[in-house]
Every structure is written in structure tokens, then in C-alpha cells.
Amino acid sequence: MNTTEKAYKEILKALNKYKSEIVFDVDSLERQAKQHLFGVELVEKYGFELDPKTINSTNWQKLKENVHIGFFNGERRSISWSDDGRQPKNETLLYLTYPTGAYIFGGDYPTEFFQKFFLELKTYKPKYIDSANKSLYFSLDNAGEIYNAYDSIIKRYYEENKGDLKQRKIKQMKDELSKLESQS
């Protein structure tokens, strides 16, 4: 038992002893303690580089844009269209999801560019994949690695996309010009 867990245990024991005499919402404090301890576990056991005090749910939470953590029981919360048909059973997963797909990189929907990005994310070995919904699900055992690398990966792709977007626009304009010239 770590120091934080021990502190919460002692504090909550005292609060519960006088629960009917005090004004504190002990149930809420217990929930907050559980959430903070989950955050501590993410940092200490799984290597997440985050502030454990920012965890405000053990059931579902957005950690970053397109990055969430949640509890999946395979029934009430499941993977919509798992590539191999498997469903998680009572496990917490980190998941990256891109509901708009390639639009994350521009209104011209650069599917090849998005596919390159998505394939790189897959190298971090997700436990479950939902290709149809462009979602990757990672067990906590290897989720810290992708979580910690995510900001630099997405930044690199956004930077690379600036040049790629320019080339896509040039090609589109040349194609339009060619089409116009052939019509005259």
C-alpha cells in the first residue's frame, strides 16, 4: 500500500466513523479518493505521464483530443465493430478514436495520409481494433507508451500535413485546369 492510499484509508475511516455527525459528503470524498488513486496507478504502475489529480472518473474520461480511457464490460460499453469480433470483458482500456476519419487532416479527406498516421498508431500494439470506426483500444499494460508518445506523433503529422495539403491542392488545381483546357 503506497502512502497516498494509506492516507486516504486513514482519513476515510475517521470520516466514516463520524459520518452521521459531520457535514462532509463522505461518499463523494470516497469517490474522489478512488479516482485519484486510479490516477496514481496510471502513473506509477502503467507509466502514464499525467497529473493523477486530473482523473475525475474511473468509468470514462477524455484525456486529450481523440484520446479517452474507459471501462468496457463488453455489454453496456463495447466496441462497435471489432475487426476480429472480440469484445473486452471487464477491462479498462485507453482508446484513440477518430470518428471523422481523415477529416482530422483537412476538408479534402486525405485518406492515404490518414491511413499512414493510423498505421503508425497501430505499431503500438492495440489489443482491439475497430477499423470501420477508426478506433484503437489499448490494454493498460501498454497504454502508457502510446499515451506518452501521442502528442509528438500528432504534432508531427499535423506539421507533415501542411506540406502534403499544399501538394494535394496543387494537384487538384492542375487537374481542374487540365479539365478546363480539354473542354475548350
Image (spheres, helix red, strand yellow):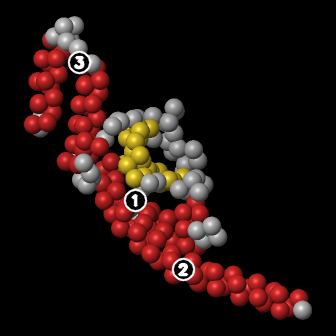
Q: Which residue is mark 1?
A: 125
Q: Mark 2 or mark 3: which is in front?
A: 3
Query: Which quadrant of the rendered structure holds the N terminus?
Result: top left
User: Left or right: where does residue 32 sit relative to residue 2?
Assistant: right
Task: Tell whether label 1 touches label 2 (CB within 8 Å).
Answer: no
Q: Which residue is mark 3?
A: 24
User: Left or right: where does residue 21 sit relative to residue 83?
Assistant: left
Task: Tell whether label 3 touches label 2 (CB within 8 Å).
Answer: no
Q: CA distance from mark 2 to mark 1?
A: 27 Å
Task: Tell whether label 1 touches label 3 (CB within 8 Å).
Answer: no
> Residue at (34%, 53%) from the top-left corner?
143
Query: In this orientation, which residue lies closer to the viewer: 50 or 95?
Result: 50
Does the image show residue 41?
no
Does the image show residue 107?
yes
Q: Earlier in the sequence, mark 2 or mark 1?
A: 1
Amino acid type at mark 2: Asp
Corner quadrant of residue 120: bottom left
Corner quadrant of residue 152: bottom left
> Residue at (85%, 91%) from the top-left corner?
182
Amino acid type at mark 1: Lys
Amino acid type at mark 3: Phe
